[in-house]
Amino acid sequence: MKTVALLTVSNAFMTFAWYGHLKFKDVAIWKIVLISWGIAFFEYCFQVPANRFGHGVFSAAQLKVMQEVITLVVFGVFSILYLREELKWNYIVAFLLILAAVFFAFKEW
């Protein structure tokens, strides 16, 4: 659970670094880049330990798939609550297909 928690915090920072500026289109792009870069620093402070602690328990491929699912969940919440965007049916279908990837990545064959 430590890996999942660290990846979730990491992705929250990265989502704000990548998309938080969309509400501030009047701010100069160079300022947005510097602010986003600063936020991304904190993302790495959680991402690197998450992968370090998780590797061995999970394979690198499993860590990546886990990270992508967490990213989509965090982004989904962010886009609805922060950006006020609509959750459409095709986004849900896409997410379900990603969950199929989780099944195949974590299933012992």
Image: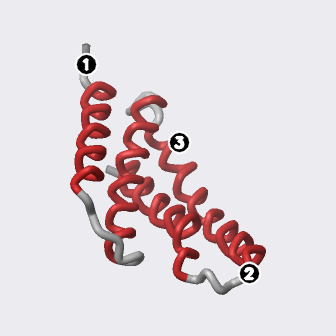
Q: Name which residue lies at 42% across and 45% down.
A: 68
Q: Disc 2 residue type?
A: Ala
Residue carrying label 2: 28
Q: CA distance from mark 1 to mark 3?
A: 22 Å
Residue 31 in which image quadrant? bottom right
Label 2 sits on a secondary structure element that is: loop
Residue lying farthest to the top in this orientation = 109
Label 3 sits on a secondary structure element that is: helix
Q: CA distance from mark 3 to mark 2?
A: 36 Å
Which of label 2 and label 1 is nearer to you?
A: 2
Q: Where is residue 59 shown, x and y percent of the image? A: 43, 28
Badge 2 local density, few (<14 within 10 Å), some, or many (20+)? few
Label 1 sits on a secondary structure element that is: loop
Q: Going by the image, does 61 lie left or right of 98?
A: right
Q: CA distance from mark 2 to mark 1?
A: 50 Å
Q: Name which residue lies at 32% across and 71% down.
A: 80
Which of label 3 and label 2 is nearer to you?
A: 2
Q: Going by the image, does 88 lie left or right of 75?
A: left
Badge 1 local density, few (<14 within 10 Å), some, or many (20+)? few
Residue carrying label 1: 108
Q: Disc 1 residue type?
A: Glu
Residue lying farthest to the bottom in this orientation = 26
Residue carrying label 3: 52
